[in-house]
Structure formats: structure tokens, C-alpha cells
Amino acid sequence: MKWVFIINSISGQGKSLREINKISKIMENYNQKFEIVKTEYAGHATKIASSYTQNDDVCIVAMGGDGTIYEVINGINRNVPMAIIPTGSGNDFSRMIVKEGEDFEITLTNLIDYKESKVDVCEAIIDNDRIIRFLNGASMGIDADINYDIVKIIRNTKIHKNIAYNLSILKHLTTHKSKEVIIHMDDEVRNIKCNLIAIMNGKYYGNGFIPTPDSNCQDGLLDICYTNSLNLIELINVLPKYKKGTHKDEKKITITKAKRIKISSKTPLCAQSDGENFFCKELDIKILDEKQRIFIPKNSTIIQ
């Protein structure tokens, strides 16, 4: 088998590129076949991943953040295994695979001696037109607005990601207004006025927030969290709990599971999927029947 490293050239402000020499050294020391491919433009990782089939006997290694994983999952053949090494600004899905802050060389060494698993893949139809796939999560509302600003700040400045998150959160907490939406969850329909809706396959998003603490990316279900018209004071009070995943008993917050969810709005709302932003009036999400093969480090304990 050959390892194909897809290196996001701009992810993590160049962190992926700085690890290339370590990749070559480690793979050669362990007598592994490998190839390194650097992305050159947005969407390039999708094109690279789509060029391999099961007959090529490769593992596609997404090396970057959640955006890199997003691009790879939108191109990869389900029968081709993938692996993830977090080197991005946002590494939320990889938190379930690799210990946060773990040394790059340790992660790669443990990945070589991998164990194989499978994870659910989500498919979203945007305004009955565009179809995307994602592994971690999607959302609409204040959290998507915040992410929209964060991406612009990180890409256009040298501000640290944590500062960018705090600046964006402060801005939108003081300007946000609840939105009226219709939610279809399996056979149930709800008309609500909400601040945010998070639809999760993974457990973490937004640089470590835990909207759905009981998420399991292997159970064939979407985990959904939405707030019911919180005012500014309520938003400020609940935010620390939302960060830690201890908000399940809050009266105006609903956490549930479904196989499919469709969200409709009269006006376009900001949405995001694994950090990729877009605007839409309707978002229809389901779990695909076919799971994605994934190679994980031998010391990984969360995904089985």
C-alpha cells in the first residue's frame, strides 16, 4: 500500500508545509511507500482524492484542518481508505482521532501501525441544487455567522485563531437576532424562532465547542442541537456551557437525534459545513448508507 499525503499549502498558516521533511524521513525509516501532493487552489484536494480508486491500493491522508477533510471527503471513493493528520487552524473532527497537541512525529508513527475503522458520511442538499458531503458537522445561525467572520480574519491577517474566535463571538453576540425556520426531523415538523442549529456527525466544532455531547460518528444518526430564541443575556450565560457540552438541561435548548433533517427559511441564512461557508434558504441533510473507510493511529481510543 502507498500513503498519499494531500498537503494543504495554506492550512494552519503553513504548518502542513513545515512537516514535509519529517514525513519523508519517517516514511523512509519505516520503509513505507508514499507520495506527497501539495494543493494549489481551493478544491484541489477534492480533485486529487477523486483520482484514486481501490485498485490503486492507497490511503489518502488529509493533512490540514477541517476544510482539508471536507475537500477530501467530497472527492474520495468510499472504497479508498483515508487518514487524518491535524495541521490546520481548526481540527475539530480530528479531536476524536488524535490527541490534541500531540507531536506530529508521534501521530504519524502511530498511523503507520494503523487500525481500520469506518465512519458515517453526511450528505447535504443546498437549496435543491448543490450537493456536498461532510464528516463532522453543519450549522446555521449565529455560530455560522461567527465562523464566516473567523475564516476571513484568519485568512487575511496574522491574528491567532483564538483571538479571532473571541473577536467574532463578541461582535455577533451584540448584533444577533433570532431567525424563524421550519425544521423537519424524520417525521416531525417544528416551527421555531432560534439562534442556531447545529447538525453534527462528530462531537466538536468551532474550535472545540461541544454542541451535541453524545455524538457518535458511527451510529448512523445525526445529532441535532438548537436554541429557542435566547436573548443576549441568556446567550452569554449559556455560551460557557455550550463550549463544555454541559448545556443539555437548559430549558431553551433542544438536543435530539434523527436520520434526516431539513431546515427551511424565508430568507437566506449563513450556514457552514466543516468550516466551509455558504448562504441558503433550505438545507437538507442525511446520513449516507455507505460509510467511509478510515485508518486511525493505533493509540486512538474514541473511534472504534
Image: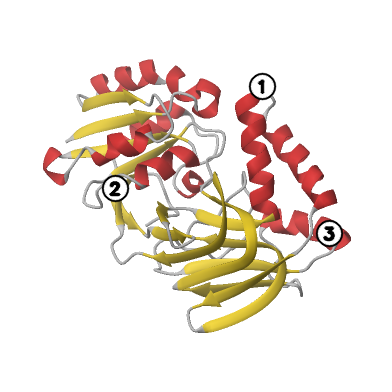
Q: Which residue is mark 3?
A: 237
User: 149 or 180, which lies in front?
Assistant: 180
The image quadrant where one finds the C terminus is: bottom left
Q: How is the image coloured?
A: secondary structure
In what element is the residue under mark 3? helix
User: 165 or 176, which lies in front?
Assistant: 176
Q: Position of residue 260 (x, y in %)?
A: 46, 72
Few, some or many residues within 10 Å of mark 3 (<14, 14–19, 20+): few
Disc 2 vs disc 3: which is toward the camera?
3
* Residue at 49%, 25% in the rendered image: 10
Q: Is residue 239 left or right of residue 149?
A: right
Q: Position of residue 246 (x, y in %)?
A: 70, 63
Q: Which residue is mark 1?
A: 158
Q: Is residue 239 left or right of residue 248?
A: right
Disc 1 vs disc 3: which is toward the camera?
1
- For residue 30, the mark is none
C-alpha separation, residue under disc 2 versus residue under disc 1: 37 Å
Q: Is residue 58 left or right of residue 298?
A: left
Residue type (three-letter) at the residue carrying disc 2:
Lys
Establish if 123 lies above or below 104.
below
Q: Say which label, 2 or 3, has the lower sequence index.
A: 2
User: Which residue is at the far left?
Assistant: 55
C-alpha separation, residue under disc 1 versus residue under disc 3: 30 Å
Few, some or many residues within 10 Å of mark 2 (<14, 14–19, 20+): some
Q: Say which label, 2 or 1, has the lower sequence index.
A: 2
In what element is the residue under mark 2? strand
Residue type (three-letter) at the residue carrying disc 3:
Asn
C-alpha separation, residue under disc 2 versus residue under disc 3: 41 Å
Q: Which residue is mark 2?
A: 115
Q: Position of residue 16 (x, y in %)?
A: 45, 25
